[in-house]
């Protein structure tokens, strides 16, 4: 009898904690902004002044995700060092050393890049995740243009996949 009571109390406490965390997350409103620059329109989704999810509003990302085909678990980069060098060249072409130092501060140190590639590794669409508001839309546009020229030397182990989602994280402090 005592064990059942303890289990019931634990269950209620866990349930109460989960409900509170879900309801507190629901209170955070996502703000969607649409901004245009240099002929491109971007959608920025963020909660207040928090980090943003930024995507080009041209619909290419969504279209490629629909055409993607079967998810493939057998994807890997054949040359991590070449990708790291390309990534460094892209960052250095968009940001000055002074700007990289400014962005390498702990709370603005980096963001995720989500690329959609064809099976040859050519990047066809780019989205950015966890971008600090300190990064300008002009910089995002330059980054997108540079990443769209990138070719990742990947191996795809399944033939039913047309497009691959490839993610990596940019950390500014490694470019100092």
Image (cartoon, rainbow, N blue to C red):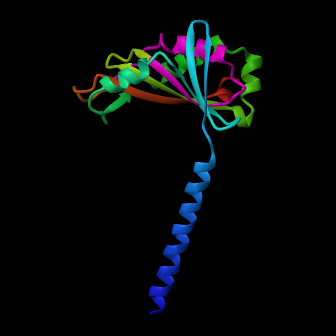
> How many numbered callouts?
0
Residue 79 in view:
no
Range drawn in magenta: 125-154
Q: Which residue is drawn at 60% across and 37% down?
A: 30
Task: Relative to 64, say whether 131 is above or below.
Answer: below
* Image coordinates for residue 10, horizontal then vertical, percent: 52, 76
Question: Which quarter shows the C terminus?
Answer: top right
Asked whether the viewer can see residue 23, the reply is: yes
Asked which quadrant contains residue 66, the reply is top left
Residue 143 % position (x, y): 58, 16
User: Is residue 83 within the magenta segment?
Assistant: no
Give 131 or 170, whichever is nearer the viewer.
131
Q: In this view, does 122 lie above or below 73?
A: above
Q: Residue at x 24, y 29 (%)?
A: 158
| Horizontal arrangement in the rendering, residue 14 relative to residue 138 (left or right) | left
Q: Is residue 108 left or right of residue 76?
A: right
Image coordinates of residue 62 in percent, x first then y, are 40, 24
Picture quadrant of residue 50: top right
Please indicate whether residue 102 sits to the left or right of residue 27 in the image. Answer: right
Query: Which residue is rendered at x = 54% and y = 62% of the image?
Result: 18
The one nearer the camera, 52 or 87, is: 52
Residue sitting at x 71%, y 35%: 49
Q: Residue furthest left?
A: 159
Pick the front one: 151 or 17: 17
Q: Position of residue 79 (x, y in %)?
A: 42, 23
Quadrant, the N terminus: bottom left
Q: Quadrant of residue 54?
A: top right
């Amino acid at each position: 009898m005592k064990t059942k009571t303890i289990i019931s109390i634990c269950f209620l406490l866990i349930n109460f904690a989960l409900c509170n965390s879900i309801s507190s997350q629901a209170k955070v409103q996502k703000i969607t902004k649409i901004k245009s620059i240099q002929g491109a329109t971007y959608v920025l989704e963020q909660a207040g002044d928090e980090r943003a999810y930024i995507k080009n509003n041209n619909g290419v990302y969504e279209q490629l995700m629909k055409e993607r085909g079967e998810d493939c678990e057998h994807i890997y980069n054949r040359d991590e060092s070449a990708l790291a060098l390309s990534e460094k060249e892209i960052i250095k072409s968009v940001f000055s050393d002074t700007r990289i130092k400014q962005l390498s501060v702990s709370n603005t140190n980096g963001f995720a890049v989500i690329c959609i590639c064809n099976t040859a590794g050519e990047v066809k669409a780019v989205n950015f995740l966890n971008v600090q508001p300190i990064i300008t839309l002009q910089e995002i546009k330059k980054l997108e243009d540079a990443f769209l020229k990138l070719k990742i030397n990947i191996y795809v182990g399944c033939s039913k996949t047309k497009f691959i989602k490839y993610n990596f994280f940019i950390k500014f402090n490694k470019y100092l």
